[in-house]
Amino acid sequence: MNKIDVYNTYSQFLKDKYGERVYKLPIKLPLTCPNRDGLLGTGGCIYCGEEGGSFENLSEDLTVKSQLLKNKDYIGSRYNAKKFIAYFQNYTNTYMELAKFKKYIKEAIIDDIVGISISTRPDCINDEYLEFLEEIQDEYEIDITVELGLQTVNYKTLEKLNRGHTLAEYIDSCIRIKKYNLRNCTHLILNLPWDDTRDVVESAKLISSLGVEEIKLHSLYIVKNTELGSMYMNGDIELISRDDYIERVIEFLQYLSPDIVVQRLLGRAPKESVLFENWGESWWKIRDMIVQNMNDRGINQGDKFDYLNGKGLKRFL
């Protein structure tokens, strides 16, 4: 971890690994999810809008290569960027026939792509898909990260969210991803209405114990025309305050292994489609509050990472 930072930032990780800034190029595919199309459920997660959890994407009618080239040209010229990660972002990007999945992944291997990130669900991880990704990683010498939407370790909350999977599927997917030498980035929402600080701490502990390489934290935003949106408008749920969210993030980071890379601390959404987002403040402003708070209190990621490898035996060692 960079000693300048109070947590292990993704930007610094990429600079250290590739020698310069690296930018993600989003890819949108014509996809759905197994708890939308009736296989595991219908309606999808209660917080998920029609964009499938992403925005600022190009049309799914464009080929993968066309989307990458267009985004690469724009981001490359705007930020003077030379290295990129192809990011399969919306919905569940392993929820398709294996042959089609292979085709999409191979299309993403173009000049200046140093990595591929694939957003998916814990119940859509399979050895055949992972074996192929490992072959691609080895053949083209690019880093492949599987981004898993877990959101919470509270199995009762997972049911309320209509996630369609339990904690067992997440643990299984983590074990399988590691077996094929791929990176794992787990997504969590730290201010779900049914969770408390104990759930936040247990999330950090479980992720650390499974050897996850990266995490992405989201502050819950509520999208219009969703079940969660209706619950919010009807007063059926209560959200924690901004300051309480800051405390949850700080507590989470203290229990998180210092080796885990933190991609982000908050989420964001298009203003025109949300009912609630980041307490009406800029995400970067709240992030800076978290960092300043940790600096002022002398807190760093991993300060409470002392619970693995037989904590009950420490007095004898």
Image (cartoon, helix red, strand yellow):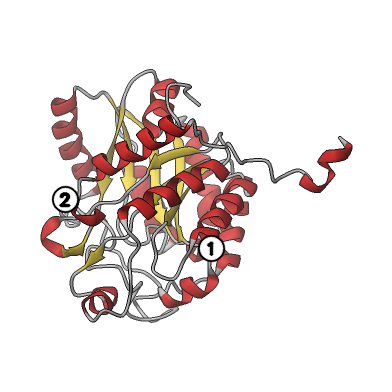
Is residue 33 depicted above or below 2 in this figure? Answer: below
What's under tag 2, amino acid-wise?
A: Leu
Residue at figure coordinates x 29%, y 74% from the top left: 228
Using the image, determine if residue 86 lies above or below residue 18. below
Percent from the top left, x then y, of residue 207? 57, 50
Q: Which picture quadrant has residue 82?
A: top left
| Depth order, front residue of 215/310 | 310
Q: Secondary structure at mark 1?
A: loop
The one of 158 and 34 positioned closer to us in this rendering: 158
Q: Nearer the viewer, residue 43 or 283?
A: 283
Report the residue marked by disc 2. 58
Q: Give the image location of residue 31, x and y in percent.
A: 30, 64
Callout 1, which amino acid? Val
Which quadrant holds residue 170? bottom right
Residue at the extreme left of the image, as rendered: 272
In the displayed structure, would residue 259 be above or below residue 36? Answer: above
Give x and y (percent) for residue 299: 50, 34
Residue 317 as seen in the image, left or right of residue 201: right
Residue visible at 22% across and 68% down? 50
Q: Give the structural element (helix, strand or loop) at label 2.
A: loop
Q: Which mark is residue 310?
A: none
- Please name the residue shown 36% across and 33% down the image: 292
- Residue on which the image places disc 1: 153
